[in-house]
Image: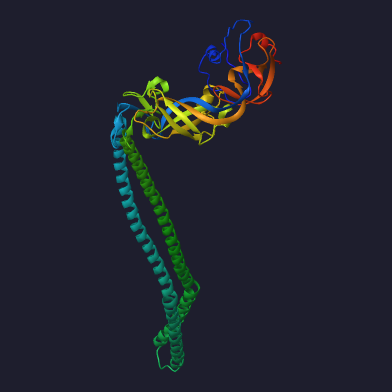
Amino acid sequence: MRFPIFGDMRFLILVVSAPLAGLLTWWGVSAAVGGGASVATTAYKVERKTFKVTLKEKGELKAVNSIDIKCEVEGRSTIISLVPEGTQVKKGDLLVEMASSEIEQKVRTNEIQVANSQASLESAKQQFEILLDQNKSNIQQAKLKLDLAALELKKYDEGDWPQQLQDANFKVEEAQKVLDREKTDRDAAVDLLKKEFITKTEYDQDEFNFYKAQVDYQKAQRDLDILQQFTHVKDSQQKESNKEEASKELSRVEKECTAKETEQKAKLEASEAQLQLEQQQLNKFKEQMAKTKILAPADGLVVYGDGNTHRWWGNDQQIKEGSEVFERQVLMQLPDTVHMKVVVRIHEAQTDKIRPGQQAVITVEGVNGRQFTGEITKIAVMADSQSRWLNPELKEYETEVTLAESDPLLKPGVTAHAEILVDELTDVLAVPVQSVYSKGAKNFVFVGGDLNADPVEVDLGLAGSEFVEVRGGLHEGARVLLAASEDLRRKMPD
């Protein structure tokens, strides 16, 4: 049993539904096939035909709009309850519940950590406020010492020193006057002693008073010199030094206060950040806790996985109660069955024949005697990655055919067949598909009688299920064999 193989992919040979013998019988052909045996056949007169070019593909029925229900719990989780597949649910109904004891423990542990962090934060705030008050007092005291030192210096320069200088000068002047008076008294005593108006004792007293006045004058003068040369310099420098030290002390206190504030502020910010981090972690755990129960976001029909009745995940574990699932895994879908589509995969050699908007006839397995109309609404830009992974040489493009109408009997995941109308050829030269033979990249038909027919290379166009367009190599009225023997087929050139 043999079907013609066409090397030129510019045309489509889609479906030959009956065995070759049946086809030949349909054409009025009696065939007997054997190794090297002749084949009794009937020739076909080439003529112009009008026929449809269709592409038949098997695919899967899906909803146009579908909501994926995913596991959003981090890591892996165990399903403890699951709504049965095929259940019609309402918005807010419980779909899936996963084990939550581990997350509950994390929530309790984190709540304790948050409470401790809040206490630490309050303590850090109070310590920071105390430090600010203490620093303010220290700075005020340092400023007061500086002000007092400056005031002491000013008081010395403008009050104490002028007064001390004035007092010392006054004592010198006073001692000078006493000395002058005692000198006069002594000189007078010399004359009086000579004239014996006074005694020697009285003279000695005047002499001693004069000597004492000299000593007092010298002492007053030395005190003035010491005050000017030493005491004033020492006191002035000491006052200046006290002021400078008070200024440095103020600067040190301000820097120490700034450093302590920076350090305590960093601790406060660290406590705040720690609390915020743990609060976020607690909120995350609470969110995870809430996500262990998945509620229906809308009304719909529950379909496990991506719509397959028997959807299996890694490690051969079906979605069921007790199975383990992972984050972002699609557990089920809620398809909107009002709008349905058929998803088929088109081989890369045939993608140039399809385009959005082409009409199609759809039949659905299990819905007998009913055909649905639809049109191509989407053609994938890239080849299907799953097909390429299974067979790198196979490149198929996922194509969506949207049904014009739906029916309550249509369910996602059911096998469907789409017959896409590629083209309709009108008044073109055509031959039956079974009359064409291929060798390499060339196509041939056999023209002539049963035993002396010769292979003629033909240029083929589009093909339907019964006829294929002939664009060159034949003329209308030529007679081609519907089946050729092996002896005839050996005449096809390499």
Residue 456, compared with residue 217, is above or below; it is: above
Q: Give the percent coordinates (x, y) of residue 16.
A: 53, 19
In terms of depth relative to the viewer, which is nearer, 377 or 253?
Answer: 377
At x 44% / y 69%, what residue is drawn? 239
Residue 160, compared with residue 62, is above or below; it is: below
User: Image check: 274 left or right of 433?
Assistant: left
Q: Give the percent coordinates (x, y) of residue 110.
A: 31, 38
- Quadrant of residue 321 in the image? top left
In terms of depth relative to the viewer, which is nearer, 78 or 229?
Answer: 78
Residue 158 seen:
yes
- Quadrant of residue 381 in the image? top right
Q: Give the percent coordinates (x, y) of residue 126.
A: 31, 52
| Name of the residue lying farthest toward the right | 493
In terms of depth relative to the viewer, which is nearer, 28 or 386?
Answer: 28
User: Image check: 135 left or right of 380?
Assistant: left
At x 41% / y 66%, what residue is drawn? 146
- The count of marks equals 0
The image quadrant where one finds the N terminus is top right
Q: Give the percent coordinates (x, y) of residue 365.
A: 40, 23
Q: Colour scheme used in the picture? A: rainbow
The image quadrant where one finds the C terminus is top right
User: Image check: 124 left or right of 54?
Assistant: left
- Quadrant of residue 108 in the image? top left
Residue 438 seen:
no
